[in-house]
Amino acid sequence: MLQMLKDLWADEEGLTTVEYALLLVLIVAAAITAWTQLGTQVSTEVGTVKDTLAGTSS
């Protein structure tokens, strides 16, 4: 039993899977941040255009 635990501790095959999972999490976090920023900027621009059109049509 002790030898099996030592072998499990020394096994590094699963390490690449964890690294890929962490990389995926970082990519998803960056994508969500970019998407949120883009949505805020688009919303601001649409509001500006709406206000401009409302001001010129009055």
Image: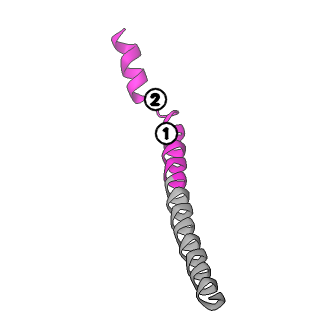
Residue 56 belongs to the span the image colors magenta: no
Toward the left, the furthest residue is: 2
Colouring mode (rainbow / by chain / secondary structure / one colour): one colour
Q: Residue at x 56, y 58 (%)?
A: 31
Q: Regarding mark 1 in the picture, which secondary structure is present there?
A: helix
Residue 30 location, x and y as percent? Answer: 51, 59
Toward the top, the furthest residue is: 1
Residue 48 location, x and y as percent? Answer: 56, 81
Q: Residues within 10 Å of mark 1 (few under 14, many from 20)?
A: few
In this rendering, which labeled residue sits more in front, label 2 or label 1? 1
Residue 41 location, x and y as percent? Answer: 54, 73
- Is label 2 in contact with label 1 (beta carbons under 8 Å)? no
Q: CA–CA distance between discs 2 and 1?
A: 13 Å
Earlier in the chain: of badge 2 and badge 1, it is: 2
Q: Main secondary structure of the magenta part?
A: helix
Q: Residue at x 53, y 56 (%)?
A: 32
58, 49: nearer the viewer: 58
Residue 15 belongs to the span the image colors magenta: yes
50, 40: nearer the viewer: 50
Q: Regarding mark 2 in the picture, which secondary structure is present there?
A: loop
Q: Which residues are magenta?
A: 1-28
Please tell me whether residue 14 is drawn above or below residue 25 in the rendered image: above
Tell me the kind of residue under disc 2.
Asp
- Which residue corresponds to mark 1? 18
